[in-house]
Amino acid sequence: MTTSTTAPAENTEEIRTSDDGQDAGHVDVLIVGAGVSGIGAAHHLREQFPDRTFLILDAQDNRGGTWWTHRYPGVRSDSDLFTYGYRDKPWRGPSIAAGAEILAYLDEVIDEDALGPLIRFQHRVTAASWSTAERRWTVEVSREDTGERLLFTAGFLWMCQGYYNHAKPYRPQWEGMDRFQGVIVHPQRWPEDLDLAGKRVVVIGSGATAATLIPAIAGQAEHVTMLQRSPSYYFAPPADDELAVTLRSLDIPDEWTYEILRRKFIQLTDWLAKTSVEAPGDLHAFLVESVRPLLPEGFDVEKHLTPRYRPWQQRIAIVPDGDLFSALREGKASIVTDTIETFTEHGIKVSSGEEIPADIVVSATGFTMSVLGDIAFVVDGEPVDFTGRVTWRGIMISGIPNMAYVFGYFRHSWTLRVDLVSDLIGRLLTHMKEKGATMVVPALRPEDADMELRPWCDPENFSAGYVMRSQHILYKQGDREPWIHLLEHEEEREILPKADLDDGTLVYS
Ligand SMILES: Cc1cc2nc3c(=O)[nH]c(=O)nc-3n(C[C@H](O)[C@H](O)[C@H](O)COP(=O)(O)OP(=O)(O)OC[C@H]3O[C@@H](n4cnc5c(N)ncnc54)[C@H](O)[C@@H]3O)c2cc1C
């Protein structure tokens, strides 16, 4: 990633105080979230607008967002890092990376762009209020460490808060949990001192987290059981991508190697996404059959590894080098496909009547989704109810001025969208300047007035549990551009760079 040669702009104006909280100053752009999206957004601001002031606020005590929150054994990406890496910064590591490697990569970006002094940790944004008269947001922050209340003001709010509540993982309540004598943990809050040696572990869930965690702990625990209600799709590519190994052995610039690998993986995911719609039966058969040879003899593939949904309706879990299946072959791990009837003192009883003994239960049961960081938004004194609002290209929201958000792809790597959205926001900020506008707000045109409003996510397209549990609190999409959230990189990489910022859906003043 290249670094702007311009010195970091001065980031705060005058410090004022108010009765409601200490005034922490004004910036041109306030970024909420220091994860992959927030750091990516900051890089683009640095590159394109070296003279504008900005800050990044994050509730956590360190950078990385998801990769800081999730530090369970074996945590790793489930997409290739050639497309999960930023466009401008070659990834030099393995195709599938450990969480710590991703954090190290983000640290390099922070250093190269001199972002460190601009990140404020333990700053939880609780409320954001827009004033048209003042043309600015007033953002209320609660300091997680001191309890202080701070007020920042900003001309533009760039929400990079991710999609789930980092402090509250999702865990269903099961009968009998209170009588269980062992330990119950969630991967989102993994206790650093958890001793697995000689323990019988049950991991509830079958998604990427379970598939990652199980091989990582199988060697330490006495036995690990994956307890799933229904199977997920897995794909087991080699940990070292063959083309990456070849290209890296040649004397060519890293940037070329990176670009070629990005194109390869973008094309592969395009193909997977397309095939999941056009020939779902073929893709289903391909995925199921590709893992069959990796399983122990007599393994019931139909029961444990044959999902009931269309491939890609939920993320396909990547199992590099088939390490999950090695753990099954070696007898260190096993799979039970059944529903939980009750926890007992010493394990979990499932509907078949079997009791799975457990000293430790890991509930790899997913996220509690959060809408724009659970921040109370107010526009000109009116509290914002997101459920009545419509997304503008999955980037802005109707009726909310000078605010953009980043939501990545379900199928392609999240970060591909960070770069595309950042380009569009950059274009928008430049366009506003050229127009002499200090405010931009998405607004339905007269011809959009009776547009059908649809749920934020079509379950036919993507039906992960955390999305389905939260549709009722989310904003909507319409039935036409630009009021839809496309979610497919193949379309967006054509559409977003050409998006007309003067098509009447953005009102400038
Ligand atoms: C284990 C795991 C593996 C994954 N692997 C992949 C993968 O391989 N490929 C892929 O594409 N995606 C993957 N994902 C999805 C992943 O979440 C995204 O790729 C990406 O990390 C999201 O980055 P983000 O910066 O948008 O949000 P986050 O990583 O969620 O970071 C948001 C940050 O904003 C902060 N924040 C939120 N609300 C507030 C507030 N009100 N005030 C202040 N700060 C706030 C949070 O504290 C957090 O630090 C994975 C997810 C998990 C959990």
Image (cartoon, grey):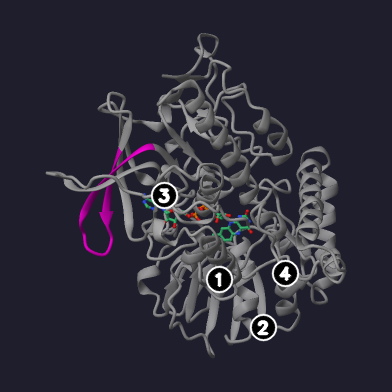
Residue drawn at 58 percent across, 48 percent down: 464
Packing grade of label 3 (10 A; few <14, some 14-19, many >=20) is some
Cα distance in 3D space between marks 1 and 4: 27 Å
Residues in magenta? 138-155
Question: Which label is found at residue 332?
Answer: 2
Mark 1 Cβ inside 8 Å of ligand 1: no
Task: Tell me which amino acid carries mark 1.
Answer: Val
Question: Which label is found at residue 9?
Answer: 3
**Can residue 140 be found in the magenta stretch?**
yes
Where, by quadrant of the figure, is residue 30 drawn?
top left
Q: Which residue is mark 1?
A: 203
7 and 363: which is toward the camera: 7
- The quadrant in which the C terminus is found is top left
Task: Tell me which amino acid carries mark 3.
Answer: Ala
Cα distance in 3D space between marks 1 and 3: 48 Å
Mark 2 Cβ inside 8 Å of ligand 1: no
In the image, residue 280 sits, relative to residue 123, either above or below, namely above
Q: Which residue is mark 4?
A: 94
Circle 4 SS class: loop
Q: Earlier in the sequence, mark 4 or mark 3?
A: 3
Q: Earlier in the sequence, mark 2 or mark 3?
A: 3
The residue lying furthest to the front in this view is 6
Cα distance in 3D space between marks 2 and 3: 55 Å
Q: Nearer the viewer, mark 1 or mark 4?
A: 4
Measuring from the top left, give residue 244's x and y in whole percent: 81, 65
Task: Tell me which amino acid carries mark 4.
Answer: Pro
